[in-house]
Amino acid sequence: MGTTGRTAYIGATILDGTKGMEPKEGMVLVTSGSSIEAIVPEAEKSAYAGCEVRNLKGLFLMPGLINMHVHLAGNGKPQKKQRDNAALVNKIMSNGLTRAVAYRLVRQYAQIELMSGVTTIRTVGGLGDFDTRCRDEIASGKVLGPRILAANEGISVPGGHMAGSVAIAAGSIDEALAQVEHCREQRCDLIKLMITGGVLDGTRKGEAGLLRMDPAMIKAACNRAHQLGYKVAAHVEGVEGLRAALENGVDSIEHGAKPDATIMELFQTTGASLCTTLSPALPYALFGRSISHASEIEQYNGNMVFEGIIACSKAALEAGIPVALGNDVGCPWITQYDFWRELVYFCRYVGVTPAFSLYSATLGNAQIAGIDDVTGSLEPGKHADMIVTDANPLDDLTTLRNVRHVVRDGVFIAEPHVKRKPEVDRELDKFL
């Protein structure tokens, strides 16, 4: 930095992340340390005198992206057959050496998120206390990475969604409440429930998203979480589960299902939000089975969930329900560097504009996460979490595939780089 410890970003077209954002030219964004100090006309040279100058002429400067649905334990590698995740996690966590290796991978995956332009993530199910550990190392400056809102392990039921892998299996209300308390001891930022099954849990057509958690357990866990000051996010991919979640205190519906009028009324009266995740269901719904390696049942259920998420998203937006964006990183085909695809899908399948999609992935997500006073838009006083692109994403969101620069808490990353999986790019690019 210059002698003042300040940096001036000049020459860029600024997109501030607000809902009605319009490109702003001829403005200079000034940072001081980790914060945005001012955004002033370029002619006001006294406002940035003594700053280190970064010339971004011809480029676009905007807030860093916020990914609201991340599992840091996975890398998105395509699978030819389902694996026993619970057995794999049990083996990984069985001794100090394998735990250490796994934690290093988790930290690496968080850094990949950052290098792809995601400056904040919300984790919703992970290995042990790895997510909060990673969060704290990043916050302390020990390692570079995105801001993390961490849930650590979710709460499922025996045989339920992700039980034994990134969620504990609570066999009773007391066991569920004990896990809520365990999350408090680990200083988590939110609680995650696995209320229904998922695409790969059904054994017959139409079984994806079956209600698995007793409503009494949902209510008890939510009540206790709220007493402790936590919001509750819940995996929900079926109508019955959607109703049970909203009736019993869940704050954020992750994924969604085709709603009816009663469910929309529940969204309105409870103030719950929706986190749209089109990315994980798309390969099962739209890929040929020779590519996805899905069974006929999995393809059918994948399409059912995909259509349900789209319907829920459209209904929520029409009703004014807050809608967040996440891409369920860790599922097959969903990598730590491809959150930008979710923004593209939001436009293509839900029908929003690129501007609304970008807003949803920045300030909109920050508002739903309760951190809009910290990040999500380019405003004085907020943290300097920013990305720079070659082209205007309001014209073409795919420019977010390769960001030119990343700034995280004022730290400038000149050449962010991720190693991509050619097979993933080749197949997913067909649906842009």
Image (cartoon, rainbow, N blue to C red):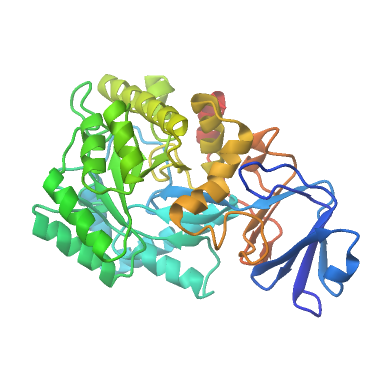
Quick one: quadrant of the N terminus?
Answer: bottom right
Tell which of 159 and 18 is nearer to you.
Answer: 18
**In the shown orientation, is residue 125 left or right of residue 112?**
left
Q: In this view, does 59 lie above or below 342?
A: below
Tell which of 276 and 163 is nearer to you.
Answer: 276
Residue at x-position 37% and y-position 21%: 289
Q: Position of residue 131 (x, y in %)?
A: 38, 62
**In the shown orientation, is residue 235 left or right of residue 306?**
left
Quick one: quadrant of the C terminus?
Answer: top right
Residue at x-position 81% and y-position 80%: 3
> Which corner quadrant of the image does residue 115 belong to?
bottom right
Residue at x-position 43% and y-position 32%: 319
Q: Where is residue 145 in the image (x, y as percent from the top left)?
A: 53, 63
Q: Farthest residue in the bottom direction? A: 3
Tell which of 264 and 326 is nearer to you.
Answer: 264
Q: Position of residue 105 (x, y in %)?
A: 42, 59
Q: In this view, does 366 lie above or below 35?
A: above
Q: Farthest residue in the front direction? A: 269
Residue at x-position 55% and y-position 24%: 430
**In the shown orientation, is residue 421 left or right of residue 228?**
right
Q: Where is residue 376 in the image (x, y as percent from the top left)?
A: 57, 54
> Which corner quadrant of the image does residue 236 belong to?
top left
Q: How many marks?
A: 0
From where the camera sits, is residue 410 visible? yes
From where the camera sits, is residue 197 visible? no
